[in-house]
Amino acid sequence: MSRPLKVGEAIKRALTDIIKEEVLGPDLEGTSVIISEVKATPDLKSAFVYILPMIGSKLNTTNFLVLMNNYTPKIRKLL
């Protein structure tokens, strides 16, 4: 397994915990989150996170992504 893949998996596990424990507030209550993939760049300076709400969540995809973008600074700090 390559290093970027290992780092991506570690980030994915950490993000799952952060979102469950820190981010899911009143705005995202009743919304389950799927982190489908995290792709780290070869130099490990950045990563791309693919995240969506589960089907049946009270938020549609557009509203969910807007809220997650608002939480991005907090998530980066905790990560």
Image (spheres, rainbow, N blue to C red):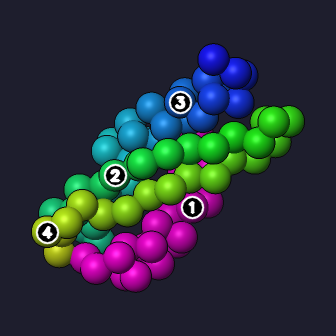
Q: Which sits in the foreground, 52 or 23? A: 52
Residue 74 appears in the picture as rendered = no
- Disc 3/disc 1 C-alpha distance (Å): 19 Å
> Looking at numbered disc 3 in the image, what kind of residue is underneath it?
Glu
Task: Tell me the residue that label 1 is attached to.
Answer: 72
Kind of residue sitting beneath label 4: Gly
Disc 2, SS: strand
Which of the 4 image quarters holds residue 62?
bottom left
* Magenta highlight on residue 62: yes
Q: Foreground: 48 or 66?
A: 48
Marks 4 and 1 sit apart, C-alpha to C-alpha, by 23 Å
For the residues carrying marks 3 and 1, which lies nearer the camera in this image? Answer: 3
Sequence order check, earlier mark of 2 and 1: 2
**Callout 4: 10 Å neighbours few (<14), some, many (20+)?**
few
Residue at (38% x, 36% y) in the render? 17
Quarter of image, res 32: bottom left
Q: Which residue is mark 2?
A: 34
Q: Which residue is mark 4?
A: 56
Question: What x and y, as percent, mark residue 21?
Answer: 33, 42
Query: Residue 77 in the image: x percent, y percent?
Result: 62, 47
Mark 2, mark 1: which one is toward the viewer? 2
Which residue is under mark 3?
Answer: 9
- SS class, disc 1: helix
Mark 4 or mark 1, whichever is nearer to me: 4
